[in-house]
Image (cartoon, rainbow, N blue to C red):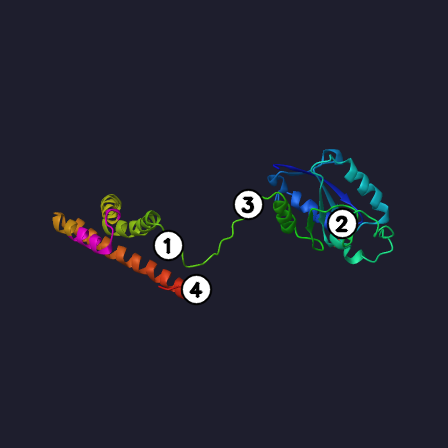
């Protein structure tokens, strides 16, 4: 079922549960994104949502609402402890009890005493998240909407491209001071190409050494040496931070 149209009936609730029903409709929880919509008449409803214990006064109205619903799927949802079992009102004089034994569904009290309840969402009142979860269970979309994941701090490693972009930003400020904007930036670009093309520290060391030896301009040679030493410094700092984080959460180095 893609959408679920719901008719809400209060069979004697203290209003706590009704306020939580309103909560799930606000943009923060936005239950309509699950295809759930409150309708003003039971004639258009797939589901009857009941809050509160079954009081004598509300019994006939709730029964009429249930019978006015289309015959299929006629889902009944009990929200709140009172609707589920009678709750704090279980022994109240206002509750209907004379037909308990003869009713079609004489179960544990609350809504199920007179209607076949498909979904119980207990709580006094249940939190909006619980209502959302219950509806998602009913619609069989929990797997789709909820993904369990164990978060472990320290397992994060900066992707290579992002790491290089981060290093470039740090080196840019330093090389600008050494060689100025124009020469500094163009040399940095050359250096970053070496970084991106090498697979390991050793390979980078050899590449940098070769580039320095091949370079005729002593100013650029000096700049390359500086860039390489700054690069090693940044990598060491990054590795130190990672090691400290791993130690903090007890992960192997
Ligand atoms: S379950 Fe709690 S909040 Fe909901 S109607 Fe009953 S007493 Fe009120």
Residue on which the image places disc 2: 112
Res. 93 visible in picture:
yes
| Mark 3 or 1, closer to the camera | 3
Q: Which residues are magenta?
A: 196-209
Residue on which the image places disc 3: 145
Q: Is residue 205 magenta?
A: yes
Count the numbered circles shown: 4
Tag 2 secondary structure? helix
N-terminal of the two: label 4 or label 3?
A: 3
Q: Position of residue 149 (x, y in %)?
A: 49, 53
Q: Is residue 202 magenta?
A: yes
Which circle marks residue 157 in the picture?
Answer: 1
Q: Quadrant of residue 69?
A: top right
| Mark 4 or 3, closer to the camera | 3
| Mark 3 or 2, closer to the camera | 2
Please say if the residues under marks 3 and 2 sit with CB atoms less than 8 Å apart: no
N-terminal of the two: label 3 or label 2?
A: 2
- Cα–Cα span, label 3 and label 2: 29 Å
- Cα–Cα span, label 4 and label 2: 49 Å
Q: Residues within 10 Å of mark 3 (few under 14, many from 20)?
A: few
Q: Is mark 3 within 8 Å of ligand 1?
A: no
Which circle marks residue 249 in the picture?
Answer: 4
Tag 4 secondary structure? helix
């Amino acid at each position: 079922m893609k959408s679920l149209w719901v008719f809400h009936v209060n069979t004697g609730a203290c209003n706590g549960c009704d306020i939580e029903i309103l909560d799930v409709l606000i943009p923060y929880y936005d239950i309509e994104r699950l295809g759930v919509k409150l309708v003003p008449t039971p004639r258009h409803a797939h589901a009857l949502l009941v809050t509160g214990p079954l009081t004598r006064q509300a019994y006939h109205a709730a029964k009429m609402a249930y019978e006015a619903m289309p015959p299929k799927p006629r889902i009944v949802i009990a929200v709140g402890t009172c609707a589920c079992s009678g709750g704090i009102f279980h022994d109240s004089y206002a509750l209907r009890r004379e037909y308990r034994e003869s009713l079609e569904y004489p179960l544990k009290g609350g809504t199920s005493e007179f209607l076949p309840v498909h979904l119980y969402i207990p709580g006094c009142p249940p939190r909006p998240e619980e209502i959302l979860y219950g509806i998602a269970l009913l619609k069989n979309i929990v797997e789709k909407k909820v993904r369990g994941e164990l978060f472990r701090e320290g397992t994060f490693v900066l992707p290579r491209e992002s790491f290089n972009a981060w290093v470039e930003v740090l080196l840019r400020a330093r090389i600008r001071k050494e060689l100025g904007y124009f020469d500094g930036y163009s040399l940095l670009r050359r250096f970053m190409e070496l970084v991106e093309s090498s697979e390991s520290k050793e390979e980078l060391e050899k590449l940098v050494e070769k580039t320095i030896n091949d370079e005729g301009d002593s100013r650029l040679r000096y700049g390359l040496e500086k860039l390489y030493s700054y690069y090693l410094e940044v990598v060491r700092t990054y590795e130190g931070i990672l090691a400290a984080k791993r130690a903090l959460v007890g992960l192997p180095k």
